[in-house]
Amino acid sequence: MKEQKIIHVPRRFVSHEWGGTETVILEISKQQRALGMNPQIMTSMALAESGCDHETIQDIEVHRFPHLYPFWGLADADRAAMDKKGGNLFSWSLFRALCQEADVRLYHAHALKRLGGMVRTAARWNGKPYVVSLHGGIFDVPAAELADLTKPIQGKWEWGKPLGALLGARRVLEDADHVICVGESESLKARQQLSHDRVSYLPNGVDASRFATGDGRAFREKWGISADAFLVVNMGRIDSQKNQLGLVRGFARFRASVPEAQLLLIGPVTQPAYLQQIRQLIASEGLEQSVQIIPGLENGSQDLVDAYHAADVFVLASRHEPFGIVVLEAWCAGCAVIVSRVGGLQSLVRDGETGIFFDPDAADADEQLAMALKSLQENEQKRRFMGQAGRREAIENYEWSRITQRLELIYQQAEAHAKKRKEGG
């Protein structure tokens, strides 16, 4: 019988700090289980409660292992920041478990650097294929985003470089049996920069039925939002990448002519200092009664669904966005969207049909966003048309069942390449 164990290896995986990557891994795993496979998630203890080294999330097993950051001089705050975002970790026990896991069909890495190196080495030692998904981007990342990721280790001495070298951390993408990019722009750049053509664009998906129905009125009542307010909703990590500061500035301009407008920011806080900047801007603009921040909702919460149905418009103002899974969720709720003209959003959204673009880095970005909001606020028919067009797009092209079928074909290509490599071809 063909081995069906798929080992997914993300950098972290906890319910209370949920994002697009966690959604993708969980939904793919659920689809794979329904198809008779045995998906498991093996990850670090980052952000997990002490002692929670094993958990079952929606019938998918999650195994966590102690980890470290091999740098001298790290403060607790530095480690916490890296747990939340982008930390280049190492785990002896995770590496050992990956190497000792039996009956593996394929390893699926959802991170690079030392963690990707552990997957690469375990796969090679066990003679199994491995694929890598680029969720946060590597070839298509702005310099400012890279600076944010490396801030906790600036001025620190890295003693873990030999570990990375031994694991072939810098060869994870070159040696992968397949590289998966969730953004089309990323996949184009990956093909240009890698020495092989084992690269596929595979977008994220959505559970359309889950987001199709919700109680927007009840959500507004629960969170103190009036029924007649024009509600703008943003869903995403409170993080400079997501550009909530730019959204607040654009909203302030819009609200000057629409005083009944309300803005809701929902998402876990990955950069506490950035949250403080947002609060300061809200106060300086006199928006304390118009902007509300909900620092994260559980992935399984009905509030998460209801928020989209409460919205008049959904805005994703990111400066960098490989894909934008929240756009699919908003579409499935029939919500009109405004998005940044960046990264994977450029191929996901059709301007004027399934959404409206604005340039977050333009000198007049605030005005562009305010005008886009105004155009939708003034035209309910336009909002309804865009929401319906987006919903059709999501159902026809992005249901998880479709995405998982395409992923299976990629797995088979990876297996064929691994077999050819072992045979010396």
Image (cartoon, rainbow, N blue to C red):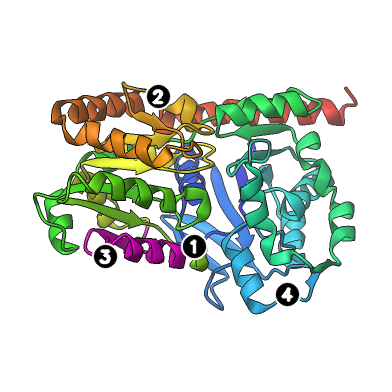
User: What crowding class fits label 1: few (fewer than 14 Cα within 10 Å), some (14-19), or many (20 or more)?
Assistant: some
Q: Residues within 10 Å of mark 3 (few under 14, many from 20)?
A: few
Q: How far separated are the C-alphas under marks 4 and 1?
A: 21 Å
| Circles 4 and 1 in contact, beta carbons < 8 Å | no
Q: Rounded to the nearest whole Å, what is the CA distance between mark 2 and mark 1?
A: 35 Å
299 over 75 or under it: above or below: above
* Residue type indicated by callout 1: Tyr
Q: Residue at x 41, y 61 (%)?
A: 278
**Real-space CA distance between mark 2 and mark 3, rounded to the nearest whole angstrom:** 40 Å
Question: Which amino acid does the dot numbered 2 rest on?
Answer: Asn
Query: Which residue is the site of mark 2?
Result: 397
Foreground tag (4 vs 2): 4
Identify the residue at horizontal 56%, vertical 30% (top origin).
408
Residue 12 percent location from the top left of the image: 58, 59
**Residue 90 or 249: which is nearer the viewer?**
249
Where is mark 4, residue-wise?
Answer: 74
Q: Position of residue 123 (x, y in %)?
A: 77, 45
Please state the horizontal and vertical placement of residue 90, each as a whole percent of the image: 75, 63
- From the image, tell me which residue sits under label 3: 288
N-terminal of the pair, mark 4 or mark 2, is 4
Disc 2 + disc 3, Cβ < 8 Å: no
Residue found at x 87% / y 27% = 423
Residue 333, image x and y in percent? 25, 38
Q: Which residues are magenta?
A: 275-298
| Nearer mark to the viewer, of 2 and 3 | 3
* Residue at the disc numbered 1: 274
Q: Residue drawn 23% across and 31% down?
A: 375
Distance between mark 3 and mark 1 Cα atoms: 17 Å
Depth-wise, is mark 4 or mark 1 nearer the camera? 1
